Amino acid sequence: MPASRNILVLYTGGTIGMQQSSEGLMPASGFAGRLREQQNQQPPLTLPDWQFRELLPPIDSANMNQTNWLAMVEAIRAGVEQHHCDGILVLHGTDTLAYSAAALSFLLLGFEVPVILTGAMLPAGVSGSDAWDNLFGAMQALHAGVEPGVHLYFSGKLMPGVRASKLGTATLDAFGISPRLRRSERAPKIPSALDYRQPRRPVNLAVLPLYPGMQASQLRALLASGVQGLLLECYGSGTGPADDAELLAVLKEAHARGVVLAAISQCPQGHVEFDIYAAGSKLAASGLISGGGMTREAALGKLFALLGAGLSQAEVEHWFALDLCGERAA
Ligand code: ASP
C-alpha cells in the first residue's frame, strides 16, 4: 500500500473545529493555525507533510448536501492534480460523516489516491476531546500506507467509508461497520460513465422508511414532488404492505414514468431478499430494485452518483444491483 508523504487536509467544518457561541457550538474558520500549533507543541509523531484547504463557509455537517459533496470532489481532485498530494484527509462533522464517506466512495470511483474522513465528538482544545487523536491518527495511517479508496477513521479504527455508520452519540467511539453483509456480484469493471472525472448534476432523491399505517396518498404526494430516485426502507428481508393495491399502483406508476425505486432493509443487521415472502415479491413486482445489505448512507450516495451522472433508469438499476466498491460484498 502506497505511503502518503504530502497530504491535503480539507476542512469542511464540524465539531472538531467548532467554538462556543451564545447559541451553542458553531463552525469556525482558522483551523490550520490551531493544527500547526498543536503539532509543534506535542511530542513529535511520524506524520506526512500537509497542506491545508478550507471549504468556505465551514458548516455543521447537519447542513451537508449534494453540492457540498461535489465541492469536496473538486477540492480533492485539485489537491492531487494541481498540488501533487498523495493522500487526502477530510475533516468533517460527525452527524453526516458516514453519508459523505459513502457518497465520496461512489463519486471517486477510479481515483488512485487514498482518502480518509475523520471528525470529533468534542471540539479540539476541550478537555477529553478526541479531536487531535482522530486527526493525527488518520494522518499516521496515511503515512503508514492506506489503500486507494475512501475510508473513515475514528477512535483508532480505520473503516471502509462505504460501510460505516454513526451508531452513537454518547461515547467517543461513535462509528461502526454495518454487519448487514450480503455477497453479491462484483461489477467486472467500473464503467467510464461512473469514473470520478464524470460530471454530476443535482438529483431529487428521497428516503422513506415503511411503517404500519402508511397510506398510498402519502407516498403519492412524495413521489409527485419530482423525486427521481426513492429509497424505501422495507421491513425485514424486503417486505411491505403488499395487500394495499393502491400503494402498489402508486409505485408502479412512478416506476413507469422513470423513477428509480430502490429498497434496503430497515433492520440494522438485515438485507433484502424479496422472494422469501409473498409480501416481498409483490412489492418488488411494482418495480423495486434490491439494495442487498447496503446501508442507507451507501444506497443514497450510490443513487446520487448513478442518477447524477445522467444514466437512464435501466442503467441505474443495472449498476445499483452490482457491487462497485465493497458496498454489497465482503
Ligand atoms: N453537528 C456536528 C456536525 O455534524 C456534530 C459533530 O461534528 O460531531 O458538524
Image: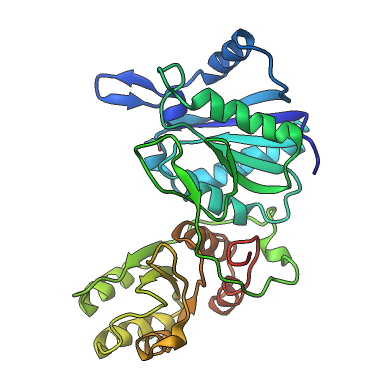
Residue toward you, 71 or 328: 328
- Whether residue 232 appears in this view of the structure is yes
Does 115 sit left or right of 285 as displayed? right
Query: What is the residue that sits farthest to the top in this orientation?
Result: 41
Could you tell me which residue is drawn at 63 percent across and 24 percent down?
Answer: 52
Residue 10, quarter of picture: top right
Q: Is residue 249 placed above or below 2 in the rendered structure?
A: below
Does 149 sit left or right of 320 as displayed? right
Residue toward you, 170 or 108: 170
Residue toward you, 51 or 74: 51
The percent coordinates of residue 69 (x first, y second) are: 53, 46
Could you tell me which residue is drawn at 76 percent across and 38 percent down?
Answer: 145
Quadrant field for ligand 1: top left
Q: Is residue 212 placed above or below 61 in the rendered structure?
A: below
The percent coordinates of residue 171 (x first, y second) are: 39, 36
Could you tell me which residue is drawn at 66 percent across and 30 percent down?
Answer: 139
Q: Is residue 306 placed above or below 83 in the rendered structure?
A: below
- Whether residue 67 appears in this view of the structure is no
The percent coordinates of residue 243 (x first, y second) are: 26, 90
